[in-house]
Image (tube, rainbow, N blue to C red):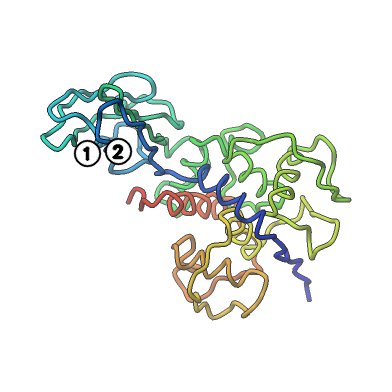
Amino acid sequence: MNTVHREEPDMTSRRARRTIFTLVAALSLLLPGVAQAAPGYDGTELILTVDDQVKDQGDTVTFSSVEGCEPETDVTISFGGFDVATVTADLQGGFAGSFDVEDDQLPGTFPVTATCAEFTDTLDLVVIDRQVFRDTIPDAFYELGVAWAYARGITTGVGGTEVFAPVAATTRGETVTFLWRLVGEPSGHDDAGFSDTIDDAFYEDAVNWAAAEGITTGVGGSDEFQPDRPVTRGEFVTFLWRALGEPPAPPAGFADTIPNAFYDDAVDWAADTEVTTGVGGSNNFEPARNVTRGEAVTFMYRAAVWAGGTLGPA
């Protein structure tokens, strides 16, 4: 019988608090900023929202704010540094309008900013190209996750090619590298001290970061990380759950998960937030099965959507 190596939870509350501040911000697709109040104004916040923060090339973006501007003044909307719309605030200082994403807009993450006098707010819009890789299938469950991950710079394809390999297994080294890229590739962390990682490997900085943040504690609490071993579904959602500060959730009720297993609370959270809906819509999670690359980026995309409080595109 195969032995499943398990990532045992051992995060201190201090690390949990630090992690939720750093990673919720990075995973978030909708965490609007708070505008600074101009002199003499009553302190109303300008909070820009859009109908969806993940858009295909050629899509229309609908934006709005309930209040925040001087009544009946002009509001300028910029996208990626270029002005794309001007609207007039209503009697409550709110506004609404829309602009189109160009058909040839490159995939990536671009700021959308609303400005009226001294008041401003900015949020990120992710523009995707669903056909960026030649080996992904249109309308597959992973299509949106793959396109989003490419636009966010989380993946550049296998070896920088036009191939994503969505059904290939995801290694533990790839897993923490995906997460590390998502949060901006932080550097300067102490060596994690794992006995089986290689200096200057593609995952080196990511593993050091994950260990410093308590996202990994080694396999079974040992001094091994096993970067080349495929990550299991239970391990993957546990990495995500720790990265988000171990949020509580009600029991998921999957038929094949073990109560009090290392992944138990993480799977509950993943089910509650619809990061997972079960294997093929069933009542099974299959925690010991390897995660494919298509599943990995889909889990990450759904977690990012949850962290931002928006349901994302249909």
Q: Is residue 153 left or right of residue 80?
A: right
Counting labels gives: 2
Residue at left offset 28%, top offset 43% = 51
In the figure, 56 relative to 280: above or below? above
Residue identifier under label 2: 45
Q: Are marks 2 and 1 in contact (CB under 8 Å)?
A: yes
Residue identifier under label 1: 67
Q: Amino acid at mark 1?
A: Glu
Q: Position of residue 220 (x, y in %)?
A: 79, 65
Q: Secondary structure at mark 2?
A: loop
Would you identify the image quadrant in which residue 124 lies? top left
Question: Which of marks 1 and 2 precedes in the sequence?
Answer: 2
Q: Is residue 150 left or right of residue 34?
A: right
Residue at left offset 63%, top offset 69% = 263
Q: Amino acid at mark 2?
A: Glu
Viewer-proximal residue among 132 and 308: 308
